[in-house]
Amino acid sequence: MMDGSQKSGNEEQRHLHIVTPLLESWTLSLVAGTTVFLKLENIQPTGSFKIRGIGHFCQEVAKKGCKHLVCSSGGNAGVAAAYAARKLGIPATIVLPKGANPTLLRRLEREEAEVQMVGKIWDDANMKAQELVKMNGWVNVHPFDHPLIWKGHGSIIHELKDSLGTPPGAIILSVGGGGLLAGVVSGMKEVGWQDVPIIAMETRGADCFNQAIQAKRLVTLPDITSLAKCLGAKTVASRALECIHECQIISEVVSDEEAIQAIERFLDDERMLVEPACGAALAGIYSGCLGQLQAEGHLSPNLGSIVVIVCGGNSIDQAELKSLRAQLGRS
């Protein structure tokens, strides 16, 4: 039987990601005062949008004879790289910061990847990955900073155009290292949606993009203090900063409390559990940020529709949610 990721004969290999549903959310629409669509990247086979770009990257380097894939990750990129490696029949080593969620480790084990845990944050793990790829034939899969990855992520916008036909009033997404933002901007330029505002959400303590915009240059955070560890790159990709000159990007920062409240409300409203990094995007609506931007004149009062990219996440379960509540001083 042929593997699901392959086509027969000489046909081009299929993508490793799936086309995800775009669902209208009655509950979030009530909060926002306008129609809200959810682009459900949380139901990708790897649990997050990361498989779009990383899958595309891995397929391309596999064509060139890659012998071993290495990915430093806060979680989701590692799962995507491990999944892609298994589908492509290539060994993979995933380097994580210490203290990774046990659920995440079990998932990587199921994907048959070797796991190494190094340091406290992603930047530490990334230094280890740079050492490993000195081996002949080994290729580094950067979690967010590569043109092939942005190209893959851009497929989200092509799917949105197919589903919606006309442009939405705005797109809300989370920013960590900036790969999703760069991919969305790439896709928007390809379909002619450059005039659609992008609301780029971060949590305080992982807000390297917002600080870079304010400083008009890349800023390296001294540490990641946010509970949204999957947004935890100390420096955003330089490409993300370039994007502010190509599309209307509004950078907003919410608290950990607002991100956690958003995932709790989303669980009640839509019966889906996502991690705090995704909660940052959802907080764009739940925290009242969208309405405030409209009141201040940064967004049109008549947006028509909003798309929230529900980026997903593997580092979350009931036990982790309980732990997050405890860290916020709540039972």
Image (spheres, grey):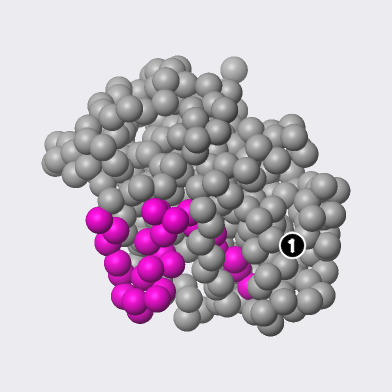
Q: At 46% from the left edge and 73% from the top edge, which residue is drawn? A: 243
Residue holding disc 1: 306
Task: Indicate whether 174 appears above or below 228.
Answer: below
Left or right, 55 with respect to 309, comes to left
Task: Indicate whether 198 appears above or below 151.
Answer: below
**Residue type at the position of mark 1:** Ile
Residue in the foreground of this view, choosing between 77 and 14: 77
Kindly tell me whether residue 7 is visible in this rendering. Answer: no
Residue 30 painted magenta: no
Residue in the foreground of this view, choosing between 43 and 15: 43
Q: How crowded is mark 1: few (under 14 residues within 10 Å), some or many (20 or more)?
A: many
Q: At 14% from the left edge and 40% from the top edge, which residue is drawn? A: 131
Secondary structure category for the residue under label 1:
strand
Kindly tell me whether residue 74 is visible in this rendering. Answer: yes
Residue 151, image x, y percentages: 49, 58
The quadrant of the rendering that contains the C terminus is: top right
